[in-house]
Amino acid sequence: MSDLVTVTPAAAELFRSLRGQHGPLMFHQSGGCCDGSAPMCFPAGEFRTGASDVLLAALAVDGVAEPVEFWMSTAQWELWRHTRLTVDVVPGRGSGFSLEAPEGVRFLIRSRLAA
């Protein structure tokens, strides 16, 4: 499924910075409201995934030793399964739980219909 999720150069740069500060990383995208609908970046293993989550990709990012796993809630994936996702970063305040929050930027998911 690795072709389902890609990363912009700006997001890759932020991954490298966060990896240097926090170690291996992971992402989770839920279908919740408010901050729960934003992609959240955590130290790998800090967010507990389970049967209600699906691993969409293990993102290889230049300059990051290990892949960044991208998880999504199964219910959200059922709605988005016809799309391809791009992890991007934009200025602004993100979730207080996501690692990029103190950086003055937030991760954002862009989607497009699958071909």
Image (cartoon, rainbow, N blue to C red):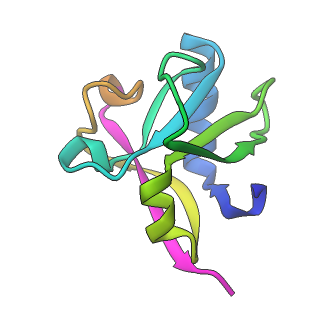
108 is within the stretch colored magenta: yes
Residue at 79 percent across and 26 percent down: it is 66
Which residue is situated farthest in the front direction here?
51
Q: Nearer the viewer, residue 115 or 90?
A: 115
Q: Nearer the viewer, residue 81 or 11?
A: 81
Q: What is the x, y in percent for residue 21?
A: 55, 12
User: Eyeballing the image, is 97 above or below 115?
Assistant: above
Prevailing SS of the magenta stretch: strand
Q: Quadrant of the C terminus?
A: bottom right
Span of residues in magenta: 103-115
Indicate left or right for 59 with 7 as reference: right
Which residue is situated farthest in the bottom direction here?
115
Indicate left or right for 8 with 106 as reference: right
User: Eyeballing the image, is 6 above or below 60?
Assistant: below
To which quarter of the image does residue 24 belong?
A: top right
81 is within the stretch colored magenta: no
Indicate left or right for 4 with 80 as reference: right
Count all numbered tags in the image, as a single digit: 0
Q: What is the x, y in percent for residue 28?
A: 48, 39
User: Eyeballing the image, is 114 above or below 70?
Assistant: below
Residue at 31 percent across and 23 percent down: it is 102
Q: What is the x, y in percent for residue 27?
A: 53, 36
Residue at 31 percent across and 24 percent down: it is 97
User: Eyeballing the image, is 76 above or below 28?
Assistant: below
Residue at 27 percent across and 48 percent down: it is 32
Q: What is the x, y in percent for residue 1?
A: 76, 58
